[in-house]
Amino acid sequence: MPQGKPLDEAKELRQAGVLSLTELESEFIRSSERRARQRDRVRVLALALIVVLALLASILGLSALAAKRTAELRRGEAESLMDYMLGDFADKLRPLGRLEFLESVSLKALRYLSGSQGDDLSPNALTLRARALQVIGEVSRSRGDSKHAIDALQQANAILMRQHRMAPQDTQVLKNLGANAYWVGQMHKDQNNWQAAEDAWHEYQKFADLLHRLEPENVEWWVEQSYAHNNLGALAQTRGMPQQAVPQFLQSIALKRRALEHAPNSHSVAAELADSYSWLASAKESLGELDEAQQLYAHEMQLALGLRERFPGESMWIYRLVRALQHRAMLGVARGMDAEALRDYDEAKQLFTQIVGQDRNNRAWQGELTNLEQERLRVLARGMPAEKALPRLTAVHAQLQAMLALDPKNASWARREALARARMGGALRATGQVQAAQKEIGKAGAALQQLYARNPSSLSGRLALIETLLLQATLQHEQKDFISLMMTCKQAYGMIKEEGASTMNHQILDPWVRVNACLQNDEAVQLAASRLKQIGYREQSYVHFISTR
């Protein structure tokens, strides 16, 4: 009903004299009318304000959503960049052999992905953070910083295992878990903890096999499986079990060749195939199959030369060629071809010195170069006076001693340092410095005894200790200390008696002949010498030894 009608009627009645209002009453009515009009204006203003606020809220909401989408887009772009830096870009840096580049990439990624527990990071960002930590572990190991390397790998593993529990079939997480297991195994192997290394590398194989089951046609997973087989084969070979190593290497080679058929331009797979050929060759060499080993080393050399030709400026492929030259030289020494072996050693040293000089922080390569020089000097020393060889042997030992000081838990460096000390002692003996020789050989023997006690199955460790014991036996023989001489030779005998009677491995048969000659076991000497002749072993110091008996 319209509100103005009662007031009109009141006005008519007042004019007719029927209704008469006092002034107070009239003022009340006028006030009521004003308040009514004010309430109407307030309602209109309130409604307008609500509409304005609603529009403003909508605008702000759309702006916030746009900002969020922009932030997410930028984060996605940044994560894609990190993925490239830690993946394809890092793979391009590795062949250059420059650790500072890899370290820079990983540190930049970690700065972006920083966070106390990573709770504010996306799953993809967490995976990238784990990969950055793995690169830090890789770089730290090459620099001889095993503690920093293990810490980084453990942090990466904690992140990846948490992600794996949330997404068991995420292939990127599985791939990175496999990579982490590889580096953990490598660190354990460096420290002579072979059971832990084997456990880690079985984990690596488990992740590679799972990836293959999820995506059976993905060539990348074939390559991961091939790496896992090669690791286990290398560990078996290092343990002196070539029969177990050979099937692993054959499986690795088959997978890599299959991968190359689908991706013929993959230089990294070609390089790893060369590595597998060299490992299989070493296993065949241990089985006395020197001709087959020579053919396999030739395959390694062919692939290494091809990579060097395609990428002449990349240090990694120069390193692969260095390794191939070194392997061929070592077999040449075993076959009595010292001149050819020295040519290979000289070329390898020249190439390696060039790339090691590009990165002084790569301790692993420095150690390899020093060891190469030690093996080269072993051949050179046969044709030079001991007085001339001694300062060079001393310099090699000093370099290896400095390396070991950086990472005292590195068993490989410890073995090489002790062996260099023993050979330096041998040169001191040859120059008539008997007391100095006894001191150095004694220290070397003590260090190698400790390594042997921690890992008796290490063939390289046993052979280094036996070489040192035979040097000690030579000193004892010259001093006519025959009781000590017999004890020393019996100790060496006990370390290889299980293999000596039946092996075709010249690395064992050579010291087996010498130890049995010391103990006057003539029948054992003749049997072992016959096997060495059968396989074509003609190492010159051995030939001289056997010809003078």
Image: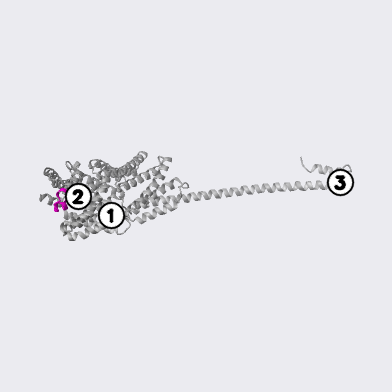
In the image, taking residue 217 as reference, residue 377 lies left or right, namely left
View extreme (left): residue: 548
Snapshot quadrant of residue 234: top left
Residue carrying label 2: 469
Residue carrying label 3: 22
Q: Which amino acid type is shown beneath numbered disc 3? A: Thr
Residue 369 position within the rendered picture, expressed as x and y whole percent measured from the top left: 26, 56
The nearer-to-camera label among 2 and 1 is: 2
The image's mark for residue 168 is: none
Q: Bounds of the magenta span?
A: 469-483
Residue 414 position within the rendered picture, expressed as x and y whole percent measured from the top left: 27, 51
Q: Which amino acid type is shown beneath numbered disc 2? A: Leu
Compare marks 2 and 1 and give the one earlier in the sequence: 1
**Helix, strand or loop under label 2:** helix
Query: How far apart are the two marked residues, 2 and 3, measured between alpha carbons?
Result: 135 Å
Closer to the camera in the image, 458 or 521? 521
Compare marks 2 and 3 and give the one earlier in the sequence: 3
Compare marks 3 and 1 and give the one earlier in the sequence: 3
Residue carrying label 1: 367
Q: Is residue 325 visible?
A: no
Q: Which amino acid type is shown beneath numbered disc 1? A: Gly
Query: How far apart are the two marked residues, 2 and 1, measured between alpha carbons?
Result: 24 Å
Circles 2 and 3 in contact, beta carbons < 8 Å = no
In the image, taking residue 176 as reference, residue 257 lies left or right, namely left
The nearer-to-camera label among 2 and 3 is: 2
Task: Please count the marks in the image.
Answer: 3
